Amino acid sequence: MRMLSYGIDWTYILVIIGFIFALIAQFGVKNTFAQYDKVHSARNITGAQAARMILDANGLRHVQVVHIPGELSDNFNPKTNVVSLSDSTYASTSVAAIGVAAHECGHAVQHQVGYMPIKVRNGIVPFVNICNRLSLPLFIIGLIIGMTPLAMVGAILFGAVVLFQLVTLPTETNASRRAMKTLEGMGILESEELKGARKVLTAAAMTYVAALVSTSLQFLRLLLIATRRRN
């Protein structure tokens, strides 16, 4: 690998591509959510009410539904068995809010049925956290002291983050499929409303695709830099 003229490392292009892709995905989900946040469900059900209905229907009455501040900060915590819905979801009767709430309930159902990808994702979290903390320090130290094998080890450890995001992608898409199936089966949303909810969840899924692409490009960049130093 060689520097471009004026001393600019061409591998920065990989970082820029990943950043642009992630930016487009974030814009897409915010724009889609804003569009369908204006479309209110015919049944006038809030995100919190929809979540409670879905959880109860799946025998998850022990799982709480709580309100948290923020926008699109919704999540499910399997350790506390709590579905947390943000300001934009909890009390809103919009199609977008109900779709997001159903998605988080989808994660709760995944834990209940023992969905394998989510088991794998949760199982590798400690390993990924360690690799993430060590990867860049080892990589940078290896470059500074001229120890290429150490830099390569740091680059390879960063690959654990790519692995985590690779496992996360099917977990998120499966939760969305469960959400759409439940919303239709329980009659929470009508036909046209389901289309809006699906668009919101599809846009949200693209943010995970973008994160995987961005991290993969960063991983490739680290490998290329370490290889250049070796050569």
Image: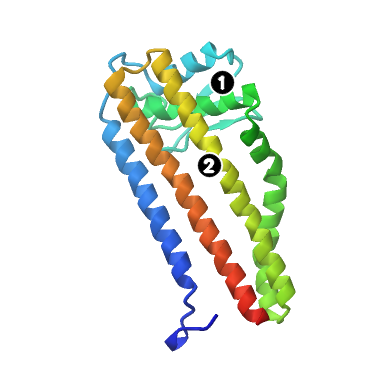
Secondary structure under tag 2 reads helix
Please tell me which residue is depicted at 64% across the width and 74% down the height of the picture. Answer: 226
Secondary structure under tag 1 reads strand
Nearer the N terminus, badge 2 or badge 1?
A: 1
Q: Amino acid at mark 1?
A: Gln
Res 108 label: none
Which quarter of the figure has residue 170? Answer: top right
- For the C terminus, the image quarter is bottom right
Taking the image as drawn, is residue 203 in sight?
A: yes
Please tell me which residue is depicted at 42% across the width and 26% down the height of the picture. Answer: 90
Q: Amino acid at mark 2?
A: Leu
Q: Residues within 10 Å of mark 1 (few under 14, many from 20)?
A: some
Q: Position of residue 72 (x, y in %)?
A: 42, 37
Please tell me which residue is depicted at 39% across the width and 37% down the height of the picture. Answer: 202
Q: Which residue does the numbered mark 2 point to in the structure image?
A: 169
Q: Is residue 35 left or right of residue 50?
A: left
Please tell me which residue is depicted at 42% across the width and 40% down the height of the picture. Answer: 204
- For the N terminus, the image quarter is bottom right
CA gap, disc 2 to disc 1?
25 Å
Q: Is residue 94 left or right of residue 143?
A: left
Q: Which residue does the numbered mark 1 point to in the structure image?
A: 64
